[in-house]
């Protein structure tokens, strides 16, 4: 007896590892759902994948980024 892990894409099962069986060998499948335990991506991985544009180190100019200069000239009435 051989036990394989596989992924179902909605149409077919794809084994995680290829079995050592001759081509066109008939098999009987018994399906057991396995819970996946993949960890969510870390914040740093998520932030790195955002592809933000700007200075490499935004902390150098954080005041200009957060508080842009405003015009102080008064309009004549």
Image: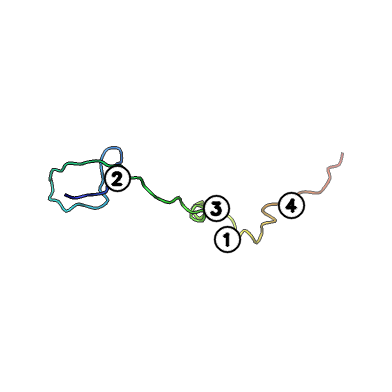
Binning the other alpha carbons within 10 Å of mark 1 as few (below 14), some (14 to 19) or many (20 upward) gives few
Q: Nearer the viewer, residue 49 or 33?
A: 33
Q: Nearer the viewer, residue 46 or 39?
A: 39
Residue position for label 2: 7
Image coords of residue 77 (percent x, y): 87, 38
Instruction: Look at the numbered disc 3 and give the secondary structure of its residue.
Output: loop
| C-alpha gap between disc 3 and disc 2 | 34 Å
Question: Residue sitting at 22 percent across and 49 percent down?
Answer: 3
| C-alpha gap between disc 1 and disc 3 | 10 Å
Instruction: Look at the numbered disc 4 and give the secondary structure of its residue.
Output: loop
| C-alpha gap between disc 4 and disc 1 | 22 Å
Q: In the visual, does 20 lie left or right of 17?
A: left
Q: Nearer the viewer, residue 47 or 57?
A: 47
Binning the other alpha carbons within 10 Å of mark 4 as few (below 14), some (14 to 19) or many (20 upward) gives few
| C-alpha gap between disc 4 and disc 3 | 22 Å
Residue position for label 1: 56
Disc nearer the start of the sequence (3/2):
2
| C-alpha gap between disc 2 and disc 1 | 40 Å
Q: In the visual, does 55 lie left or right of 68?
A: left
Question: Residue sitting at 22 percent across and 41 percent down?
Answer: 30
Residue position for label 3: 52
Binning the other alpha carbons within 10 Å of mark 2 as few (below 14), some (14 to 19) or many (20 upward) gives few
| C-alpha gap between disc 4 and disc 2 | 55 Å
Q: In the visual, does 32 lie left or right of 43?
A: left
């Amino acid at each position: 007896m051989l036990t394989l892990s596989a992924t179902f894409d909605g149409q077919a099962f794809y084994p995680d590892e290829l079995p050592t069986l001759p081509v066109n060998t008939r098999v009987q499948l018994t399906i057991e759902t396995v819970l996946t335990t993949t960890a969510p991506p870390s914040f740093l991985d998520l932030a790195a994948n955002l592809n933000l544009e700007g200075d490499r180190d935004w902390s150098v100019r954080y005041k200009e980024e957060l508080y842009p200069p405003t015009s102080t000239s008064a309009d004549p009435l």
